Amino acid sequence: MKLLEYQAKEVLASLGIPIPPGRVARTPAEAEGAARALGPVAVKAQVPVGGRGKAGGVKLASTPDEARSAAEQIIGMDIKGFRVPLVYCEAALDIADEVYLGFTIDRPGRSNVLMLSAQGGMEIEQVAEESPGAIARLHPHPWRGPLPYELNALVFEAGLGQHVRQLVPLIQKLYRAIPDLDAITAEINPLVITGEGKVVAGDAKLETDENADFRHRELLDNYGGDIEGDRYEEEAKKRHLTYVALDGEIGIIGNGAGLVMSTLDVVAYAGEEFGGKRPANFLDIGGGASAEVMANGLEIVLSDPAVKSVFVNVFGGITACDAVANGIVSAVALLKERGEAVDRPIVVRLDGNKAAEGRRILSDAALPIVEQVDTMDGAARRAAELASKGA
């Protein structure tokens, strides 16, 4: 479960981490009232994705009238597929320095990793790419967590030794989100150090493990109503499909998580030849998918206007390739019946159980938008090429 910024800050405050005063505003009038009470504010779009500032979703307001105007511009706007339902009006801070602090799961290392950097305010991916040495890392012991001497060393490694007395206890409080809330990611960026030397969470991200939701019903009860999820992921959940939205142009459908993950890598590699085209989603139709499931998956992928081509990669096992082929034909027919344009190319690679029958079904259907390619690498390259032509 991804929390919005104001929600994450409320959770951080419950852990004892200082946050600036702020108010939620669902209307421009409420934003105006918040500025009257708080003084100069930052008016921030509340969506569960990054890049709000670059998208125009964060504006500074010196007066109540400016706060009202900012809210009018931000509420209702679209940021990376998320409609902004409300804004958070937060009192301006006296910023002397900005620090990055966060933890997430290091999957290759099979552990949590704490990260600290003096280059706060920048996305950690950008820091890692441009200045990898600027990020200090610590893999805490999974049972006892980080010890004070380990955190002291982390702070000094990050070049923030002058703030060690403030940072060490704050990091310990943030880390409590792992055992207490089953958090998989928590980030404060920037962690502001004020002119008076105090540390305050200037921004916050918090994501908890959905598999542990039953242990944290209060989070769902308190915050579930304000979070508007990715519309394609929400629709996929209704249809019992495993779907994750990505930021690309090539729709991906496969059977089995391992095959889909491999497909993402192959497509990303092939896309480099065609202007950096990348996967638009992860969609696993499962090991025993029927024609109906295949049709549902294709319908969701094609409903995303960012998708310029689709790669269907199926190795028939429990899922027979003839069922997949029938699903593709059914999905195209269904979309046409609804009056929806079905004009984006679909590259299909079928192998394994009843692959010959599946290929014959697609050939007999003679769908002008469907191409069949025998190999996975060849199909990925063709999907990337077609996506570049449709851009």
Image (cartoon, grey):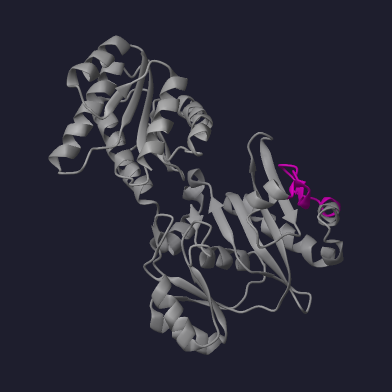
| Residue 320 occupies quadrant | top left
Asked whether the viewer can see residue 23, the reply is yes
Q: Is residue 75 above or below residue 317?
A: below
- Left or right placement of residue 128 versus residue 369 in this view: right
Where is residue 93? Give x, y as percent: 66, 78
Q: Please give the range of residues in magenta.
A: 131-150
- Left or right placement of residue 114 versus residue 241 in this view: right
| Residue 17 occupies quadrant | bottom right
Residue depicted at 15% across the width and 44% down the height: 339
Where is residue 380? Give x, y as percent: 44, 26
Q: Is residue 233 above or below residue 261?
A: below
- Left or right placement of residue 58 versus residue 304 in this view: right
- Left or right placement of residue 229 versus residue 364 in this view: right
Residue depicted at 27% across the width and 38% down the height: 299
Q: Nearer the viewer, residue 283 or 225?
A: 283
| Residue 314 occupies quadrant | top left
Residue depicted at 41% across the width and 74% down the height: 73
Residue 136 belongs to magenta span:
yes
Classify the position of the C terminus by image quarter.
top left
Asked whether the viewer can see residue 31, the reply is no
Where is residue 75? Give x, y as percent: 39, 71
